[in-house]
Image (cartoon, rainbow, N blue to C red):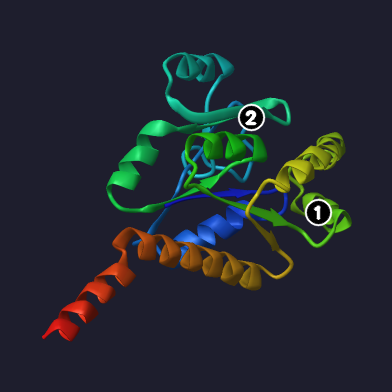
Amino acid sequence: MLFIISAPSGAGKTTLCRALVAAHKEDFWCSISYTTRYKRKDEEDGRDYSFVSEETFAGMIKHNEFFEWARVHGYYYGTSVKPLEEKERMGYNVLLDIDVQGGLCVKSKRKDAVLIFVLTPSLKELEARLVKRARDNKEVIQKRLRDTSYEIKEAEKYEYLIVNDVLEKALLDIESIVRSVLLSRVRRKMNILDTWKKEINSMSAK
């Protein structure tokens, strides 16, 4: 299955994705996006993002190397198609930690993808988290907060909404959604009820 996790910057979607993968390493893999954004001091290339130049990113677009890509907060972000397809072939459930533009783009291509949106309890709390993590200057923080108006509007198209107030609770909420979806899809795929009906009819005929 393909799960898309989106959120305003600072809401904690990356932390939740990493926590889910850490708890279920055998079942889940989380994509690492390419970006033209500058690398922050606490970030590592290949762990947080794959940092590339705009020229390199444009070349990847030209050669159809992205499953999805978008311009967000003034920079380009994209999901490479090759590792995603490889992990799906290996049987992993794939998590895409991407923005709403990318999420809806993926949904248009993969109708079976599951959209999950993460929010803080309030806009004031989101601002407090952005300030506390001290990764961006005041101007960047204000731009990210302004961008939430678009993100919240698009979030109405998502299937699930999680409020990340307490991390442990939010993780349990995501796990519950994932488990429910997987059980539902497995039931349809295996047609377990049809199998039972056949066995019952066979038993009745004896």
Is residue 97 depicted above or below 23 in this figure? above
Of the numbered discs in the image, which one, if any, rests on residue 19?
Answer: none
Q: Quadrant of residue 170?
A: bottom right
Q: Is residue 9 visible?
A: no
Mark nearer the N terminus (2 vs 1): 2
Residue 110: x %, y % from top left: 47, 39
Give the residue at x 84% y 55%.
128
Return the residue at label 2. 37
Q: Name the kind of residue labelled 1 in the image.
A: Leu
Residue 26: x and y in percent read 34, 62
Q: Residue furthest left?
A: 206
Label 1 neighbourhood size at 10 Å, few (<14), some (14-19), many (20+)?
Answer: many
Q: Nearer the viewer, residue 112 or 66?
A: 112
* Picture layout, residue 144 above or below residue 15: above
- Say which of marks 2 and 1 sits in front: 1
The relative height of residue 81 versus residue 130 in the rendered view (above or below) is above
Indicate the position of residue 182 as horizontal and vertical percent values: 43, 63
Check disc 1 and report its element: helix, strand or loop: helix
Instruction: Judge by depth and name the residue closer to the eye, 192 or 72.
Output: 192
Left or right position of 98 against 59: right
159 relative to 62 in the view: left or right: right
Residue toward you, 168 or 140: 168
> Which residue sits at x=54%, y=56%?
17
Crowding at mark 2 (Cα within 10 Å: few <14, some 14-19, many 20+):
some
Callout 2: SS: loop
> Which quarter of the image is occupied by the C terminus?
bottom left
The residue at the point 49 percent across, 18 percent down is 61
Q: Position of residue 36 (x, y in %)?
A: 60, 26
Residue 126: mark in rendering: 1
Camera sees residue 202: yes
CA distance for labels 2 and 1: 21 Å
Please state which amino acid type lies under the numbered disc 2: Arg
